[in-house]
């Protein structure tokens, strides 16, 4: 398939490369010249605007925010007839329903398929994809979806996948902050946090986030960024908004959300999300 992949940042680029490695003709689109340069070095053709990409059968949207998705749709909605769109960003159910309706009205077929698994699993093609939409549309896109990971069908309505991702990001948000608080507690008790991490991560108190983020929490501010604080500001805000919209009580999410905002406000927004631990210092 001919694929235009919009958003080739830290997680988008390895996803796009997996699609290319599966035999598809992929062009990346990103406003960032740095992202385009990295893509070109990695062997992926990349351009600075949607209009500059070759005509495609499939468009994958991996932008960061609901505003960016709306802006993308604004710029292309007159030229999407006959295309299949995969919205893989974490932008919340309301955003996908609104923009998906606009794309469908313009003649596109749309599937909602946010991902989880992080950069490491994006590189190996082991993401989990929460796909929702028309059954035949999902089926037609399986050659592309399967290149990136394991597809979980979550429903027939646009936004069902995003709703699952909201629950997922609730847990991720809380688990990262819980890991940071626990390792901070270890230090306050006079223990070596690295030793504590090794002792507890495989037991009942362990979590994927503790094992993945814990080692980076023990590093310094300049640890490699795989997911920025600002991403979890955005994602935990989305969870909070979705919870408010349905009247759900999420006090633990509120605490985690406040920590991400505190970290961002202290200048750590572009740093790795593990640096939320610095709000305890």
Image: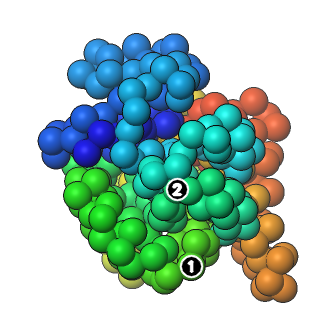
The residue drawn where x is 58% and y is 72% is 158
Residue toward you, 209 or 93: 93
Position of 90 with respect to 254 (left or right) is left
The residue drawn where x is 30% and y is 65% is 140
| Number of on-image labels | 2
- Residue 182: x and y, percent? 57, 63
Residue behind mark 1: 157
Whether residue 209 appears in this view of the structure is no
- Whichever of labels 2 and 1 marks the residue nearer the N terminus, that label is 2
- Residue 251: x and y, percent? 79, 77
The residue drawn where x is 45% and y is 81% is 154
Rendered-image quadrant of the N terminus: top left
Rendered-image quadrant of the C terminus: top right
Query: Which class describes the residues within 10 Å of circle 1: few (<14), some (14-19), or many (20+)?
Result: some
Which structural element holds mark 1? Answer: loop
Residue behind mark 2: 108
- Residue 13: x and y, percent? 37, 35
């Amino acid at each position: 398939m001919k694929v235009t992949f919009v958003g080739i940042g830290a997680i988008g680029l390895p996803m796009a490369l997996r699609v290319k490695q599966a035999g598809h003709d992929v062009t990346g689109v990103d406003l960032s010249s740095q992202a385009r340069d990295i893509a070109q070095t990695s062997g992926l053709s990349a351009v600075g605007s949607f209009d500059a990409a070759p005509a495609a059968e499939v468009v994958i949207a991996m932008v960061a925010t609901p505003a960016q998705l709306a802006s993308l749709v604004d710029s292309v909605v007159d030229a999407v007839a006959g295309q299949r769109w995969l919205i893989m960003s974490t932008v919340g159910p309301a955003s996908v329903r609104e923009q998906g309706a606009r794309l469908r009205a313009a003649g596109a077929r749309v599937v909602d398929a946010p991902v989880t698994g992080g950069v490491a699993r994006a590189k190996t093609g082991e993401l989990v994809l929460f796909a929702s939409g028309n059954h035949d549309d999902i089926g037609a896109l399986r050659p592309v979806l399967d290149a990136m990971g394991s597809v979980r069908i979550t429903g027939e309505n646009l936004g069902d996948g995003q709703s699952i991702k909201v629950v997922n990001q609730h847990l991720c948000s809380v688990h990262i902050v819980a890991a940071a608080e626990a390792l901070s507690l270890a230090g306050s008790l006079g223990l070596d946090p690295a030793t504590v991490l090794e002792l507890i991560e495989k037991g009942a108190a362990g979590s994927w986030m503790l094992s993945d983020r814990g080692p980076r929490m023990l590093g310094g501010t300049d640890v490699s960024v795989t997911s920025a604080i600002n991403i979890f500001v955005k994602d935990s805000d989305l969870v909070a908004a979705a919870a408010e919209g349905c009247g759900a009580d999420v006090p633990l999410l509120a605490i985690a959300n406040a920590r991400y905002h505190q970290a961002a406000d202290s200048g750590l927004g572009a740093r790795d999300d593990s640096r939320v631990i610095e709000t305890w210092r």
